[in-house]
Image (cartoon, helix red, strand yellow):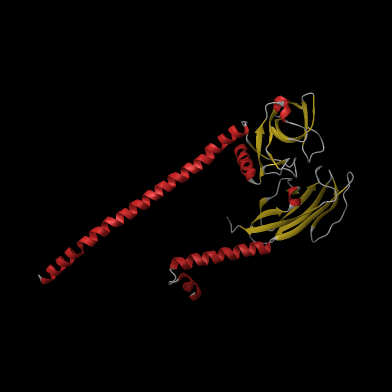
Amino acid sequence: MENDELVEKDFESDSEADLEDRKKVPKKKKSKIKSFIWNFVFYIVIVGGIIFGLPKILVWALDTQYPMAAITSGSMWPVLKTGDMVFIKGVTVLEQIEQGDIIVFQSDSNGTLTIHRIVSIKEGIITTKGDANFTEDTPISFDKVVGKTLNWKGDKPVRLPYLGSVTNLSTRLRNK
Amino acid sequence: MPWMEKQAGRPLKTSDKVIGIILVIIFLFVFYVVLDANKYKMQVVVIDGEGKVGVNPTTELLDFGDMSRGTESVRTVTLNNGTFMPVYVLVWQTGRLSEIVKVTDRNSGEPAQAFKLKSDTEVKLEFGARMPASAAIGDKYTGRVFIFKIPTFGL
């Protein structure tokens, strides 16, 4: 009996502190879960914004449906290398481009997009050539031009090395 | 493992020991693969003119000699797998010259950046440098090639 009483007393004496502890632990757990959910939502919003929002922002800012392009060949070496990602700025009138600009255009022969440098513009007909190539491309009219590369420091195109390799790899896998 | 226990500040658990052994094995494996890799230096000098290819072959490096724009030069490396198991061959190029050098299998003509080489067989890898029109005359382009042979262990 004495023992039982003692135990009961002990329990009673600690009960307030225990209750506070019991209240505290779930609070901590709750706050941890809450912060985890908030962080998770925050990162989802950030990643989602980058994945879905950035292309739309680029389309709007660069005024073209093709704001980015991956380099698939070495025809513009050493200015652009295979695997580079470049930004394309849309052009609406012929006056926006000039000799020496690197433009993106739809090739007449196979309909694919090509990124080469303008060597001459005569009476609205644009002749291009890859820097590393020895021959000029088939001349094109302005309506085939999609845009020109976004440059920095004069005539150097803004490029993200290796990032285009991801696009090239996914295209290759899709075509397999 | 007293040193590790001192670092950890507690006695090592069995799981710690297992992870440690796995990490040591991975390290030794990577060390062996890197040590066993064939390593070559590459170089080429751009010269003026048309269709000029200077012959300057050495066995120590993949020297493409002097080349004028528009010319192509090929150097061959023979790779032999003398082990009892197939190996994965990984060709990794660095440096500015690597941007204009392509690696192909001489027999198939296919790109040979990564492939499986059976036991007791050999392959001839062709390193072809094509000098583009935009190469600057007088420039010397260099690079390095690492050919890793990774044992497959029957995988």
Residue placed most toward the observer, A64 or A166: A64
Count up the numbered dots: 0
Place of residue A14 in the rendered image (x, y in percent of width and height, measured from the top left): 21, 64
Please determine whether, in this image, residue B142 is positioned above or below residue A91.
below
Seen from the viewer's position, the closer of residues A115 and B19 is: A115
Q: Please say whether residue A170 is visible from this viewpoint.
A: yes
Is B14 left or right of B155, judged from the image as shown?
A: left
Residue at 37 percent across and 49 percent down: it is: A34
> Which residue is depicted at the point 67% across and 58% down?
B148
In the rendered image, residue A50, in percent from the top left (x then y), is placed at 53, 41
Residue A124 against residue B114 in the figure, above or below: above
Residue A109 seen anywhere in this rendered image of the structure: no
From the image, which quarter does the C terminus of chain A lie in? top right
Quadrant location of the N terminus of chain A? bottom left
Q: Residue furthest bottom?
A: B2
Residue A106: which quarter of the image? top right
Along the line of sight, the residue nearer the viewer: B81 or A74: A74
Specify the quadrant of the image occupied by residue B51. top right
- Above or below — where is B65 with respect to A99? below
Q: Nearer the viewer, residue B29 or A139?
A: A139
Q: Residue at x 74, y 51 (%)?
A: B98
Return the residue found at the far top.
A123
x and y percentages locating residue B42 in the rendered image: 78, 56
> Which residue is farthest front?
A153
At x 30%, y 57%, the residue is: A25
